[in-house]
Image (cartoon, rainbow, N blue to C red):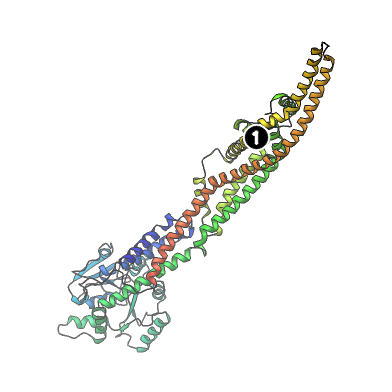
Amino acid sequence: MLERMAKVRAAIAALRSIANACPFFPSLSHGEGQLAALLGQVQHGLEAPGRPFRILLTGGTGVGKSTLLNAFAGATIATTGARRPTTTGFSIYLHHSDVDPWLEALDQGEIIRHSRPELLGKVLLDSPDVDSAITEHRAVLERALALADLALVVVTGEKYVSESLFSLLREYHEGRAFAFVFNKTDLSPESSLIQDFRDQLDTAGYHGSPVFALSARNALTKHSEEGVRLDDDFGELVSYIGEELHASRIREIEQSNVRERAGIVTSFVRSLLPGAWEQAAQEWKDGCGMLFSEFLQEVTVSLQRLVLREDELAVAIASARGSSFEGPFGFVAELVYVMRRLRGNSPRFTTPGEVGEWLRARLNYGFWARLERREKLLLEACAQLGPANGLASDALREELEELEPESDGIVSWFRDHLAGSLASGWRQHVDAPGHLLNWLVNLPAWAWGLYWMYRLIQPVLKGQSPPWEAIPGAAVVLVVFLLIEWSLVHRLLRRDGAGRANRMVLSVLSDLDAEFYGSRGRSVATVAARIAQCTEQLSTALAALDAVADSSWTPHGERNSRDP
């Protein structure tokens, strides 16, 4: 029981602050004032066992509420008269032993203490008139009615059909018990009027609520004459208040009140929330994730088409690897690559700085401007997904902007991450040919050189003149042969470079995808987690109140032992 009480109190505390703690559901803030009032009623219901049972006398002008209170007290403790309205505040009839901080804190209440044992643990409040023309009086009455345990509604034959009365009854039908007094029967003795009033109560949903027909004025006169027995009709009401409202009956009413008030709160909160509010976080995250995915797809397609072109990267990789050869073949290859670079059709870079320069050269200002505008539209589109799920777009936008990674903007972010990932891939895929391959490509040149050394040395050994005139031709043949070899090797390098370029581009785009989701996607996940935390808090609070509304349980054990 104590554990359930703790959950209920925690639920009330959570719902009191829910508008500020959960800014994602704007409808909660719209009903914040009404929700606070309803939660106050539940709170007062939970505190009922530790305070007197509140019985509120209410009714229209001149129905005799003050006279009825005086009849209970046996003396003139409340001002009576035909002036409209008579009661401007509360007349509170409270036992000397009872304590109710809320009543004692009322700024419009006069407390009259008594020592009547049958009213120990109960308090009678005489309130302003239901049909008062003064707005203040209506507010005072509703404040008391909202926190009353039992409303004792007084009517007369002249004005029991009152729209202001039934309007108030409809508004506060749940969360408190009702009893009715048909007063001044000495002036309107027709039983048909009383029966008509009962019929109207049944139609309004008050079937089973007790109705007492009496004359409070006659009862007060008889009560003031020593030794005279109370009027039987008034005696039934006194018996109901003094004896029938015993501890177990009061506890039953309090339990019913708390259950109904808890049900009102949960119904009201659910009426404020969108239909699928428990799935709002995931729905929004999925929708926003789809927008991010589409954005990245657009970016990657543009990058592949305009920047990370595999054919150009394959040439660059082949050039870089071809320039790594040594010896005669390496000299000719480097000479060819230098000439190709001078013609501007062979990109080459080896450091992150050079990669960044190459990216800047490849990407014009228009591309970056479109990218920046597209990213801003993306964040705005994510925020605008909120209203479709009952979420506040402004709250989502503020959260996303607050959690967005610090940078100089989407342009510099993309450029830096592209440059870093491209440089890393470049170092990985552009490696030297290796000693064996270098030796193989230079083998024909060294063999040709050895052959001509033999041609020059052999005549000298025989005492003949070396064939110097053939050396220029041999050199030309060597260069032509090396160029043909370079063409073949370059084709092989291009074919290998195409595969390396493809893997590098995929790696760069994969890194970009991961980094982008790691930075931008994390903010979306954080916002979604906050929304989910909010819905979880709401679900827990409503479940705790539902447990109260759907079961019979005592708010806080037994009532005070002083109760009759």
Please name whichever residue, 461 or 84, is drawn nearer the observer in this view of the structure.
461
Q: Is residue 236 left or right of residue 444?
A: left
Residue 146 image point, x, y percent: 35, 68
> Total number of numbered labels?
1
Relative to residue 68, is residue 432 depicted above or below?
above
Residue 506 image point, x, y percent: 64, 44
Residue 82 image point, x, y percent: 30, 75
Q: Where the C terminus falls, by quadrant?
A: bottom left
Please name whichever residue, 362 or 489, is drawn nearer the observer in this view of the structure.
489
Q: Residue furthest bottom?
A: 191
Q: Amino acid at mark 1?
A: Val
Relative to residue 183, is residue 302 depicted above or below?
above
Please name whichever residue, 523 or 186, is drawn nearer the observer in this view of the structure.
523
State the SS at label 1. Answer: loop
Quarter of the rendering containing residue 216: bottom left
Please name whichever residue, 320 or 509, is drawn nearer the observer in this view of the structure.
320
| Residue found at x 78% / y 19% | 454
Quarter of the rendering containing residue 108: bottom left
| Residue found at x 48% / y 56% | 531
User: Around disc 1, counting alpha carbons within 10 Å, would you say few (fewer than 14), some (14 to 19), or many (20 or more)?
Assistant: many
Q: Residue furthest front?
A: 462
Q: Which residue is mark 1?
A: 430
